[in-house]
Amino acid sequence: MKAVVITTPGDPEVLRLQEVEDPDLEDGQVLIRVAATALNRADTLQRRGMYPPPKGASEYPGLECSGTIEAVGKGVSRWKVGDQVCALLAGGGYAEKVAVPAGQVLPVPAGISLKDAASFPEVACTVWSTVFMMSHLSAGETFLIHGGSSGIGTFAIQIAKYYGSRVFVTAGSEEKLAACKDLGADICINYKTEDFVARVKEETAGKGVDVILDCVGAPYFQRNLDSLNIDGRLFIIGTQSGAVTQVDLRSLLARRLTVQAAGLRTRSIENKAAIVSEVENKVWPAIEQGKVKPVVYKYLPLAEAAEGHRLMESSKHVGKIVLVA
């Protein structure tokens, strides 16, 4: 098969489409003939040598895919050859075939094309596990998403609105904020021209929001705490602008704040399967009702993975970038 290989850690041009060995199919896994994969910020970190795959995972990048099941391992009962599916991966999506534990596989939602289905698994599992399963965002609460126009952000806006929250977003241009507004965001804040803490306080009568999803990290940490309501929850899923900071712990104590952080890739197979099961039950119906739509900025052939990485690192995109195998 062909796969995108990181020939050496570096800039996007180190990504090359090469002939490689087919993946081995183990018990409890299915082999997917990949139709499409979607880019994630973690892929760019892996390319630079900063985010190695977990032990036993494919060395090729790609944390999600869609495609058709080509073979089924021992002990797999739900899936059969020919099923059209999408899947959450620990790696290997940038390839023509990938082997994945059966519990991380999802049916393609009704009404969604096979290639667009590749844009859902990573964002759906990330947002559902962090915002809903761990931070317990509920109807009537307020929710701030940093990077509202990202793949994570565009999904989070829609699913939070579906479940009855008032949604705040930050983004860095009026064009991106307009895209967020179109997806249902209630309060759109340009972080380059506005102080998001002041705007959050203004829009919540001084209280702050209930939940924040943050990918920025250190520079926003204290400001996020300052933006939270009593019993507020901050969830950190990235440190794009820094990982080390200082905090005034009194702000946590006084308002009973909770700070959590998690990745998805390094979780156990059992934990991922539990998340995927909840996503199918709680998120897939929203997609099938047309309440949560795929937001794809650009489709590129697998051979142009480097161009996809350049686009992602330029941050010009809104939503997901999809590579078509």
Image (cartoon, rainbow, N blue to C red):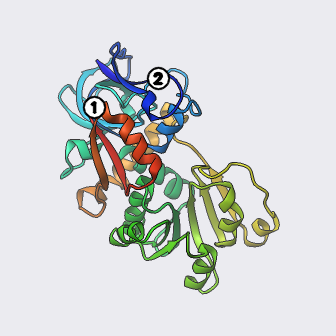
Answer with mark 1 or mark 2, whichever residue precedes in sequence: 2
3D distance between C-alphas at marks 1 and 2: 27 Å
For residue 176, what is the image quadrant? Answer: bottom left
| Quadrant in the picture for the C terminus | top left
Q: Circle 1 sits on which residue?
A: 78
Residue ID for mark 2: 59
Q: Does residue 105 appear in the picture of this structure?
A: no
Compared with 53, 182 (above or below) is below
Is the residue 18 above or below the residue 272 in the image? above
Numbered disc 1: secondary structure: loop
Residue visible at 74% across and 50% down? 244
Residue 111 seen: yes
Which picture quadrant has residue 208? bottom right
Q: Amino acid at mark 1?
A: Arg
Residue pushed farthest bottom? 205
Badge nearest the viewer, 1 or 2: 2
Q: Is residue 47 above or below residue 171?
A: above
Q: How many marks?
A: 2
Element type at mark 2: loop
Amino acid found under the numbered disc labelled 2: Glu
Q: Residue at x 28, y 64 (%)?
A: 291
**Pointer 1: residues within 10 angstroms few (<14), some, or many (20+)?**
few
Q: Is residue 299 left or right of residue 204?
A: left
Quadrant of the rendering where the N terminus is positioned: top left
Residue at (58%, 70%) from the top-left corner?
Answer: 210
- Horizontal arrangement in the rendering, residue 56 relative to residue 253 (left or right): left
The percent position of residue 72, horizontal first and vertical second, equals 28, 21
> Whole-percent x and y of residue 175?
38, 68
Residue 170 point in image, percent of width and height = 51, 68
Label 2 environment density (alpha carbons within 10 Å; few <14, some 14–19, many ≥20): some
